Amino acid sequence: MYRLYVLITLFLLFGYSFWFMYTLDHDDAYRLGYSLSLFDLPVLVPTVGILGLCLVHLRKRSSKSAAYLFCFTTFYVYMMGVAHYSLFPITVDPNLGEIDISSSINLNPIKIESWQYLISGQVLLNILMTTPFGLGISYVKELNTRQVLMWGFLFCFLIEFIQLVLLWSLQDTTFKIDIIDLICNFAGVCVGYGIFWTISHLEVHRELYNQIHMDRRYASISNQEQMKS
């Protein structure tokens, strides 16, 4: 029954989004093009709705602690922030003709343009963008070093892949696919995990980390045992 409620809620959320987009003036949209932001209702409503469903599931079904729910919400908002920064706005302009997108793709890390890019401020921004991923993912799911690096690389690769799909499908040259971006983003993940690994040796952090990943049932049993003793 619980899964049925979840499916119905998701259906209503996405149904609302499609209905909202359908009620737009399609003639004007087709003639002028349109730009979709993360904060537009067709995107924002499902985003917030999915977060709500996840929190209800984690609280009711998985018995996660309030500390864990806080970490999960913070990480979810961070991921949406990355999407907002790297993937939005999504602009559809039907008046554009065929565009050579090869100039927007760089897969050679030793090109002169790549070296010029390395000394620009954009590199630091790309590193800082993914540093919270390496720092925060372990608060959402218990992972070892290899797993963190694997998920971090997949996360960085997924950003570039989605940008490539949008570049190819929408002919939107505002998306730039650069191997240096992937390298810098992964470096940010490594920096973030390095910070987590460093503070994980502190006793205060170990107690907090264990409390985050302790579900309510186990915490209740532990408290009862402590009261008896």
Image: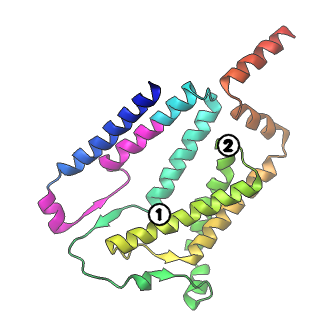
The correct choice, above or below, for 219 with respect to 154 in the image is above
Q: Which residue is under mark 1?
A: 86
| Residue at (74, 38) in percent of width and height | 209
In magenta stretch: residue 40 = yes
| Residue at (78, 40) in percent of width and height | 205
| x then y, percent, for residue 1 | 44, 24
Position of the C terminus by quadrant: top right
Q: Residues within 10 Å of mark 2 (few under 14, many from 20)?
A: many
Location of residue 151 (image quadrant): bottom right
Say left or right for 122 vs 188.
left
Along the polypeptide, which appears first: circle 2 or circle 1? 1
* Distance from Cα at disc 2 to Cα at disc 1: 24 Å
In magenta stretch: residue 111 = no
Of 200 and 147, nearer the camera is 147
| x then y, percent, for residue 176 | 46, 75
Q: Which residue is under mark 2?
A: 139
Say left or right for 165 vs 157.
left
The residues colored magenta run 26-52
Location of residue 202 (image quadrant): top right
| Residue at (69, 46) in percent of width and height | 138
| x then y, percent, for residue 49 | 40, 38
The correct choice, above or below, for 79 with respect to 2 in the image is below
| Residue at (32, 83) in percent of width and height | 99
The kind of secondary structure the magenta stretch mainly shows is: helix
Say left or right for 96 vs 102.
left
Secondary-structure class at tag 1: helix
Q: Residue furthest bottom?
A: 112
